[in-house]
Image (tube, rainbow, N blue to C red):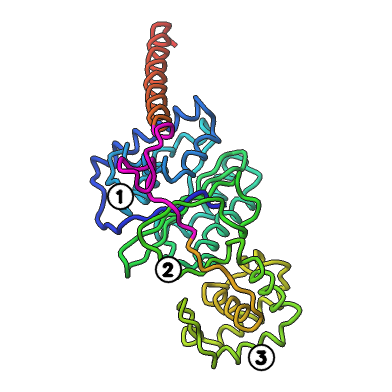
Amino acid sequence: MRTGIVELPLHYGPCPSWLFKRMVELSRAIIEAIVYEFGRDEVLTRFSDPYWFQSFGCLLGFDWHSSGLTTTVCGAIKEALRGTERELGIYVAGGKGKTSRKTPQEIEFYGEKYSISQTENLIYASKMSAKVDNTALQDGFQIYHHTFIFTKEGKWVVIQQGLNQKIGLARRYHWLSTKVDNFINEPENAICCDWTGSVLNLVAKESDQTRKTSVKLLTKNFKEFLKDLEKVKILKMPRRHDILPIDFDFKKLEKIFWNIHEYGPKNFQEILEIKGVGPKTIRTLSLVSEIIYGAKPSYEDPVRYSFAHGGKDGVPYPVNKKAYDRSIEVLKRAIQKAKIGRYEKINLLKNLSLLNI
């Protein structure tokens, strides 16, 4: 499931090369320290935590609250781990814009090079996490950044970000494989922001009936569903959300629905898997399910809190000293371990040199 959501104001412009170079070096030292101290799985767990990731970005010296923190930090992580894959057993695929669409090919590349047997499952996880946050959760943010980090054991974490230019915000989503039972039922928890808009959330538990009705419409009741589409065209939409018939090209949608029907999905997740199924397809299914069959989906934004450790004035809650101290301790131990590791390597090289090896 998603382990958190956080929003950041949109900032544009490149990261200075002098800063990015240092971000790469420090990222590598800290990640190596965590692997040697706690193991590979802990690296994934840390990156799945939006609080920790935000603190990590601050530690690297990047703008603490800008959208660029996500893309630049992920870029630094990818560059930092380049060449360490065999030693650490951690691989990074994806990135921003066009690079994000190369994620499946990069996963396959690492799979072949390092004999990873679960590449099909990894590619599926990458595609579905993006599809869910872009299609099943319609919160006004278009995914434009997708970083997929995985281990040789087949565990993974997703850090992806969506864009909403109208309000000048980006929204970041974190996923962790060890908390995923399936991709369509209730993200575990989330973090909040100052803005929420009109949201259609079909991965909420309250949307379970809508998901089931959608599958039934496209399989057992398909002919009736096509007739219901005609009814939707003339219905007056409720004001509480912005799904309007004018948004839909019904002829194009009908072709997509026929494709889904012929595919014969067994559940809502299989509907999302089908190529060509996008936000409008899902909105139409949701609309018919609600208006015609009374299966109401959730319109609650899964966003909760925007502060990592609370605030000194008690807003949104008093400072969580335990969590605060843990963050400091983790960073101190990681950096100290990295320094010790480098010192030991230097001494080893000196000893080998003395032995003329």
- Disc 1 marks which residue? 65
- What x and y, as percent, mark residue 306? 38, 50
Write down the residue under mark 2: 140
Label 3: which secondary element: helix
Q: Residues within 10 Å of mark 1 (few under 14, many from 20)?
A: some
Q: Residue at x 42, y 51 (%)?
A: 305
Instruction: Give the magenta-colored segment's residue range.
Output: 302-324
x, y percentage for residue 279? 52, 73
Residue 248 in the image, given as x and y percentages of width and height: 50, 84
Q: Give the residue type that dot 2 points to.
A: Gly
* Of callouts 2 and 3, the N-terminal one: 2
From where the camera sits, is residue 169 visible?
yes
Residue 227 - label: 3
Residue 42 at what x, y percent from top left?
Answer: 52, 34
Of 119 and 251, nearer the camera is 251
Of label 2 and label 1, which has the lower sequence position?
A: 1
Magenta stretch encompasses residue 105 = no
Q: Is residue 235 left or right of residue 68?
A: right
Mark 2 and mark 3 in contact? Answer it, CB < 8 Å: no
| Viewer-side residue, 293 vs 143 | 293
Q: What residue is at 30 percent from the left and 59 percent from the top? A: 10
Q: Look at label 3 and name its amino acid.
A: Lys
Q: Nearer the viewer, residue 10 or 291?
A: 291
Q: Is residue 314 magenta?
A: yes
- Rounded to the nearest angstrom, the CA distance separating label 1 from label 3 is 49 Å
**Residue at (29%, 46%) from the top-left corner?**
64
The amino acid marked with disc number 1 is His
